[in-house]
Image (cartoon, rainbow, N blue to C red):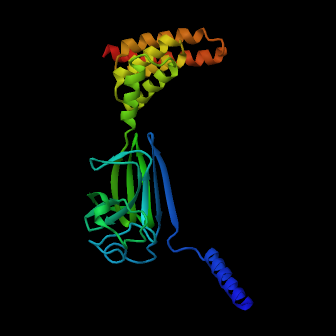
Amino acid sequence: MKTLLTIAFLITTTQSFAQSIFPGLSPKGRIEQTIGNTNITVDYERPAARGRKVFGELIRYNNLWRTGAGNCTKITFDKAVTINNKTINKGTYSLFTIPNTNEWTVILNTDTTLYGTSGYDEKKDVIRFKVKAKSTDRHYESLTIDIDVVPNNAVIYIAWEKTQISLPVETESDKVVNDFVQQNLLTDKSTDPDEYATAAEYYFYLDKNLDWAIILVDKAIKMKNDAWYYRQKVDILEKQMKYPEAIDCANLAISLNQQRSDWDLKAKEQSEAQYKKRIEFFRSKVKK
């Protein structure tokens, strides 16, 4: 009995040692990305080409593929998103694809326990849609899944060898912000001037709802005579091409900065020079 236990221990130890020495052929990969107010995470295993022809041979066309190796690839959304005009509830889903020469089918399925495609049940699909496949200049030796950030939305890229597909993902970030602004800021419920200014900045950088942005920054200025708020207002007015109003606001900002006790003379002069340069630019626009 003692001998058997010793042999079993040696076998287990040897296996553990071997597993720690020899790298896996398809190492685990993970990408996490915050998109607006939504977190997206992809967990997958990354097979390598290793000199093989991938699509059409290693990965056969028109066949269901786990889009990885080993366990099924999983994608998690911590809030509801929209994919291909369909709402996908928050949660974790398995990601499958059916590659073809010019077009792939992308599938999200609720069963995340699968190893490969074994046991796959089409009835558990939550969405199935087609996307175009394109050739890439870069050679992807290993399967690569990446998430690009498009202001408050995302594009998920899946690439291997010289083939790539992409799938847009829309978050509810803009809706959440708009609802908050309408319910709490445009109604004057908030008493925090920075909330109004931050909302104005949000719309300014997205270049949308600029009329709201002006209303919001004006509310911030009314609550607190802060130099940052005036700079924001000048920026928004410039984007709206309201140059006379931008000139007036810039002059107010100069006057406010001259009264600041927390700035030394050099800082005040630098700020004034920057505003005067902008005023000169605005005047040139007015003359046209």
Residue situated in front as seen by the camera: 121 or 62: 121
Q: On the picture, is 148 further left or further right than 269?
A: left
Residue situated in front as seen by the camera: 185 or 122: 122
Please tell me whether residue 187 is drawn above or below residue 89 in the rendered image.
Answer: above
What is the tally of numbered marks visible in this picture? 0
x%, y% of residue 158?
Answer: 38, 60
Please tell me whether residue 77 is drawn above or below residue 180 in the rendered image.
Answer: below
Please tell me whether residue 103 is drawn above or below residue 156 in the rendered image.
Answer: below
x%, y% of residue 107?
Answer: 32, 60
Q: Residue at x 52, y 22 (%)?
A: 194
Q: Residue at x 28, y 50 (%)?
A: 84
Residue situated in front as seen by the camera: 91 or 2: 2
Using the rendered image of the protein, determine whether residue 240 is visible from the camera's viewpoint. Answer: no
Q: Residue at x 43, y 73 (%)?
A: 49
Q: Which image quarter holds the C terminus?
A: top left
Q: Which image quarter holds the N terminus?
A: bottom right
- Farthest residue, direction front: 1
Q: Quadrant of residue 71?
A: bottom left
Using the rendered image of the protein, determine whether residue 99 is visible from the camera's viewpoint. Answer: yes
Q: Quadrant of residue 249?
A: top left
x%, y% of residue 79?
Answer: 42, 45
Q: On the picture, is 8 further left or further right than 86?
A: right
Q: Residue at x 51, y 74 (%)?
A: 25
Residue situated in front as seen by the camera: 179 or 161: 179
